[in-house]
Amino acid sequence: MEEEQLHRSYDARLMKRLLMYARPYWLVILISLLLLVVDAGLQVLGPLLTKTAVDRYLAPAGEPVLPWLEQWLAAGAREGLIQIAGIYFAMLAASLVLQFGQQFLMQWTGQRAMFDLRRDIMSHLQRLDVREYDRSPVGRLVTRVTTDVDALNELFAQGLVTVLGDVLVLLFIVAAMFRLSPGLTLLMILMLPLALGVTVAFRRIVQAANRRVRVAVAKINSFLQEHIAGVIVLQLFNREDRAARDFEKVNQECLDAHKETISAYGWFYPAVEFVSLLGFAALLAWGGTEVRAGTLSMGVLVAFFQYGMRVFRPIQDLSEKYNILLSAMAAAERIFLLMDKKITIEAPEQPRAFPDRPAEIEFDDVWFAYNGEDWVLRGVSFRIQPGESIAIVGHTGAGKTTITNLLLRFYDVTRGAVRIGGVDVREMDPRVLRQQFGVVLQDPFLFTGTIGGNIRLGNAEIGAEQLERAAEQVNLLEYVRTLPAGFEQEVRERGAGLSTGQKQLIGFARALVHEPRYLILDEATSSVDTETEIRVRAALERLVSGRTSLIVAHRLSTIQRANRIFVMHKGKLRETGTHQELLAMRGIYWKLYRLQYQEQEQLPQSAD
């Protein structure tokens, strides 16, 4: 539904915001306008040269229209026509250069403006609240940065200045025609309402078709993003044929919308051409009669035919530019709707400094809901002392990951407070807050690049020695040394070609190399095999040592080493204690242990 939003065909507020992106390039636009004005004047000069050639040399009659030119022309017909032809050729060459310069400058301006706009959109997307990504499909966001920005580029490159050029050409031509013959000019103007009527009908059809095209393109982007990302699941469950049929429907919608647009264009241009030919027929009938009566020169009639072709061309161009404007307004509305989404998770005007000493973490009567009052956390309170290792366990949906999200301030609490060293995290700069944490997720995300680049994550201060030391501490270095390029080994999108365990070890090295003061492990070992877990176990001890750690895990080996275990159940903190203390309580943890951990505890003992 968001793709169909378009409140008005033209919105001055949106246009003003768009023009802000063109403001830095005002000098280039001014030069382009000057070139356009000169070219518009040359468009008027051509038929006047033809009129001079006919009335002076071919069918002498009429008064001179360009006396400043005729006084320099030769008396002989041959020499004079050669001179006029040379001037005409020079005019065409100058017009070619002017049009190239104008198009080049406006295309350059459009690309630069869109570069700035894409940069601002990307910057906004990176600062946007995580909550917004929960609501917006990735395909829709990709459409904003690609298809919608391209529509705005057409407005800058072909719409703003060229519309003015078409209007200037039309005004200059009408003025020149009135000077030659007011009667014939009125005759041509009578044809304009027909052409405008065709244009209005065309505009309505294309407007609806363009809206359907936008919706269809957004659906295709969303469909492709989802199904390409999940291609393994499709192949695993043999759903390729079903996906192909579903895509066939989406693709057919796009095809039908484009066919409607093509049909509209196919009718529009011949219709305008037909109206122009009616004008030429009337011009020939009336003008020919006046020429035979001697009240009109042959040169004027010939010039009017040339002007007639130039009159209808701007009308066609203006209708096309209107469609560009319409698409651009719709694209701008969607883009600025995205950019106007309020960022709530941001630094306050005067952020509090992060504690420079080891500080405790406190959850004080925290309530939180992702939607409305569907509470995920209910009155959760606890304190984590500096250097303490805390494990969080509980059923799926108990609120374990939500606690880490609130601590990192991806979301703000609904009630209560989260504090570090007595300072509410909402009073801190989120960037400074997150710099203090190392996080290892269940499914570590790897970017296209190299292994070393995925560990550094753009931090140029991390040298080769730090990189090797971190890899060695998490038992990754041995694997890296077997690679032809070592840390420069290429990593494809999302770590394709690497095993889950290898990606997990890279995630551990990433967390360790940045030397965080706090550590969060969110199901960090749940997706690795037993052998990999044994290799990771020593790495975990190094990671946790000397750091305040918060571990969301199911593996018994990790939980047993924690100083305390928090048991979450239905959004509440129900039990707290060590492994043995919780077992002795014979409560929720004891039930979880019997259901999940007892069998897992026997596996390492059997291996020993």
Image (spheres, rainbow, N blue to C red):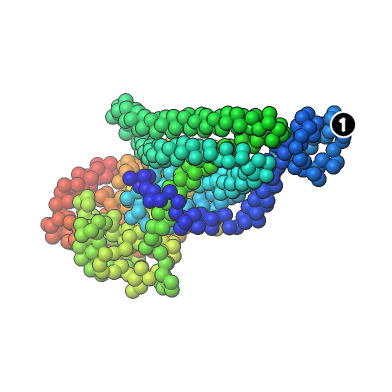
Near-viewer residue (350 or 137): 137
Near-viewer residue (55 or 367): 55
Q: Eyeballing the image, is 397 above or below 231?
A: below
In the displayed orientation, state which residue is furthest to the front: 293
Q: Quadrant of residue 173?
A: top right
Q: Residue at x 56, y 49 (%)?
A: 160
Near-viewer residue (440 or 176): 176
Q: Eyeballing the image, is 354 above or below 270?
A: below
Near-viewer residue (572 or 535): 572
Q: Residue at x 28, y 59 (%)?
A: 403
Disc tally is 1
Q: Residue at x 45, y 40 (%)?
A: 200
Q: Residue 591: in sight, yes or no?
A: yes
x and y, in percent, of residue 217 in the image: 41, 38
Q: Quadrant of the C terminus?
A: top left
Q: Quadrant of the N terminus?
A: top left
* Residue type at the position of mark 1: Gly
Left/right placement of residue 157 relative to residue 431 reads right
x and y, in percent, of residue 527 in the image: 32, 43
Q: Residue 145: in sight, yes or no?
A: no
x and y, in percent, of residue 574 in the image: 17, 61
Mark 1 surroundings: few (<14), some (14-19) or many (≥20) residues within 10 A: few
Q: Residue at x 84, y 30 (%)?
A: 77
Left/right placement of residue 539 relative to residue 183 reads left
x and y, in percent, of residue 19 in the image: 53, 55
* Mark 1, secondary structure of its residue: loop
In the displayed orientation, state which residue is furthest to the top: 241
Q: Which residue is mark 1?
A: 76
